[in-house]
Image (spheres, coloured by chain):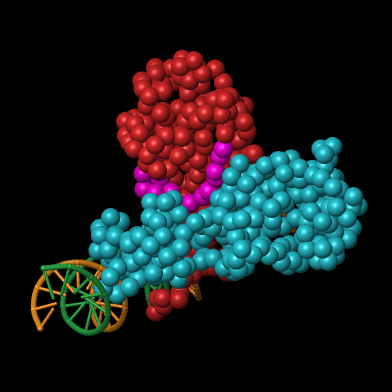
Chain colours: A cyan, B red, C green, D orange
Amino acid sequence: MTDPKDVLGGVALWRRIADAIRLDIIGGKLASGDRLPTEAVLAERFSANRHTVRRALAVLADEGVVGAEQGRGTFVRSARRLSYPIGKRTRFSENLAGQAQTLTSRHLSDRLENASATVAQALGLKAGAKVVRVEGLSSADGRPLSRATTWLDYRKFPDFAARLVALHSTTAVFASYGIDDYVRASTRISARHADAEETQLLGLSAGAILLVSEAINAGLDGSPISYALSRFPAERMELVV
Amino acid sequence: MTDPKDVLGGVALWRRIADAIRLDIIGGKLASGDRLPTEAVLAERFSANRHTVRRALAVLADEGVVGAEQGRGTFVRSARRLSYPIGKRTRFSENLAGQAQTLTSRHLSDRLENASATVAQALGLKAGAKVVRVEGLSSADGRPLSRATTWLDYRKFPDFAARLVALHSTTAVFASYGIDDYVRASTRISARHADAEETQLLGLSAGAILLVSEAINAGLDGSPISYALSRFPAERMELVV
DNA sequence: ACTAGTTGTCTAGTTCATTAGACAAATTGA
DNA sequence: TCAATTTGTCTAATGAACTAGACAACTAGT
């Protein structure tokens, strides 16, 4: 039938069930080590077939969130979503210190381009002005946590990318340009589904949800320094204001 | 086959295409009145069949975002996502003033309950303490924008719900308790898929994405006043810090 | 009037998602 | 050891999602 009016659906039931259970775990309703309700009970709760529930559980098991043990039940393995504080002074590594053992930032690529209207406005430039664009990927304990694209004014930071590769820290690179301090001027937050590239780089399942943050960092005088578009997997991160 | 390893998928292609196009429109890549690429071009861009693209466009047409005209093409009808500023002083109605013509808040229900661990911690109470729970729905220009659940200490605000029904404004109710000013103490932001009830109340299609904000309002002395869990449709709202 | 380009509709076939039922395999406690 | 409970595996059937191709209907420009 597939009516034009059938606007419902589009997200498979097994995925919605997996999302709901993951949410219960992350939200604290189920603690690490707890036994989940049996497959039969879950099937009834979600008005689904046991096989559909099993598929959802298989996905969660694959993510390491739960583990099934034949004859015993299915148990919560890990949990916890990392928190990323957003404030005046937002520094990736400092923010997550203490929440994870190892933090790594990988430089993916960089290039010169002409600023789009959006980028130009964010950086206070004219549309078409030369800007440096840097693509990066950050991980905690081996799990990708953020896919970020950063734009900077080429006139102010001509070799930003090269210095970033050498220094491995945004803060350090800014310091090398004589900028010892900077603040988060504005942050816009939205959410959407991940696209193919993001899915792959962040190691997500297709259809995963991303928190998208568009941030402008500015010097202490208020002049824009960088415009960053960061994408966080909603299942691993939350933003704290 | 449906391997256990096949963790991919779960979100229908037509929905991902619809989300992507909507994002282009909201993000400004396509302005109101612009003609979309032809169905054939879109099909190639998304590596999908033309029929699948047509289904995505049908959904967007149903939402009023685009409109197809036989022989001419498909055109952008409306656009724009509302911005919800999050700051020290966060007042729903003030924040959205100027972005919409009419703002309405609907009281859905209220009840007394014993605080869960989460709520108790947020409000600085002991788990199990009596709290007032209020369910509400806010709309702008007739479109639902936020589904909120608010918890308050019963000892401090025993008849909060009744006053809210009478006064129609959270700020006014707090004022009636002698609280003339309060600030946003913390906000945690995450994202997930909408559940059945949220889908229905917010007038969304199943599988839509919500921005979830958990906010604690506090008096000027820092003592918690209310704990609110608000859910915004990501396709209609963005949060600005 | 004609042509090229675009959306609208129809048929058909394949793969994925979901339901249904049955039984095996492992665990736990009586 | 036995019975109850739970997860693991298999087969089968139905409907939704997606692909494929063909052609009709409409628009705009020549």
**Residue A166 image offset from top left, x and y in percent:** 83, 66
Residue drawn where x is 52% and y is 37% of the image: B215
Left or right side of A106 for C29: left
Nearer to me, A24 or B61: A24
Q: Is residue B124 visible?
A: yes
Residue drawn where x is 82% and y is 42% of the image: A219
Residue drawn where x is 73% and y is 62% of the image: A135
Q: Which image quarter: residue A217? A: top right
Nearer to me, B209 or A221: A221
Q: Is residue A136 above or below residue A8?
A: below
Which image quadrant: the C terminus of chain B? top right
**Residue D13 image offset from top left, x and y in percent:** 23, 74
Residue drawn where x is 36% and y is 21% of the image: B159
The verdict on residue B38 being magenta is no
Nearer to me, B10 or A29: A29
Which image quadrant: the N terminus of chain B? bottom left
Q: Which image quarter: residue A186? A: top right
The verdict on residue B197 being magenta is yes
Q: Is residue B77 visible?
A: no
Task: Please state the extent of the stretch shown in magenta in the rendering.
Answer: B186-203
